[in-house]
Image (spheres, helix red, strand yellow):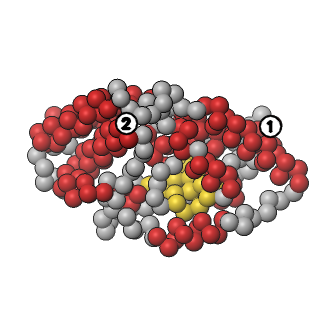
Amino acid sequence: MHPEVLVRDHTVYACVMGSRAFGLATDGSDTDRRGVFLAPTPLFWRFDKPPTHVEGPAEEQFSWELERFCSLALRANPNVLECLHSPLVERADATGRELLALRGAFLSRQVHETFARYALGQRRKLEADVRGHGAPRWKHAMHLLRLLMTSRDLLRTGTLTIDVGDQREPLLAVKHGEVPWPRVETWMSALSREADEAASRSPLPAEPDRARVEDFLVRARRASALSAAAGPRQPDPDHEVVQGVARGRGVGQR
């Protein structure tokens, strides 16, 4: 089965990410789409397994196979976890809605390590730009600040919120190069310290609920196998309702 067919015919969840989901979109912002597809179970019975991810078919589109997505989310991958909390959902069938209902099962205090490690790597790249070119890539600096805020607030509250809310204008000022780099550095360091402090008393559990997620994955695989044996999959009667709600919001709205 061609990878694009997997995305076209077997996507269970799709959303808009990037600046539009973060509440940081401007007139020139791209529309970044992310999705999760459930490869038909019989494809795993062959020597050649289905792909773990697919780029495209549209520009700025990336999709994960369900098992790969769950595995990354259980390891507190920032990009994957944030996909489950996008305010701009474009598609969700019955399996996708169950995946969304499992969002809390993926969250744990492990996010402190993974978000902090990712942030550190991004900050080192920005510092290298400053040394080499006299200034960072300001858009990347803005998104690093946003990630640090998200990490801190998640550890404080146990809830992952990706829209920046009232921090939109201060963050866009960074993107436009209106905030001196030393002030941005100080802001980043303060957010990192606040996340460290929040981690010690976070309401999040120490580990994600792996058993609950695995039960969901096994049931999804079993249902896919039974569906393949029964013939072509019938459309989900609630699918168009979910799409209609997403289209009503509009990807350009915050």
Residue that carries the numbered disc 2 in the rendered image: 155
In this view of the protein, can residue 147 be seen by the observer?
Answer: no
The CA distance from mark 1 to mark 2 is 42 Å
Three-letter code, disc 1: Arg
Q: Residues within 10 Å of mark 2 (few under 14, many from 20)?
A: many
Coordinates of residue 130 in the picture (x, y in percent): 17, 38
Secondary structure of residue under mark 1: loop
Three-letter code, disc 2: Leu
Quadrant of the rendered image containing residue 166: bottom left
Q: Residues within 10 Å of mark 1 (few under 14, many from 20)?
A: few
Lateral position of residue 169 relative to residue 224, left or right: left
Q: Residue at (62%, 69%) from the top-left corner?
A: 241
Judge by depth and name the residue closer to the eye, 73 or 35: 73
Label 2 near label 1: C-beta < 8 Å? no
Coordinates of residue 232 in the picture (x, y in percent): 83, 59
Residue that carries the numbered disc 1 in the rendered image: 46
Q: Residue at (34%, 42%) from the top-left corner?
A: 153
Lateral position of residue 181 relative to residue 120, left or right: left
In this view of the protein, can residue 196 be seen by the observer?
Answer: yes
- Using the image, determine if residue 59 lies above or below residue 128: below
Q: Residue at (26%, 48%) from the top-left corner?
A: 142
- Using the image, determine if residue 126 lies above or below residue 91: above
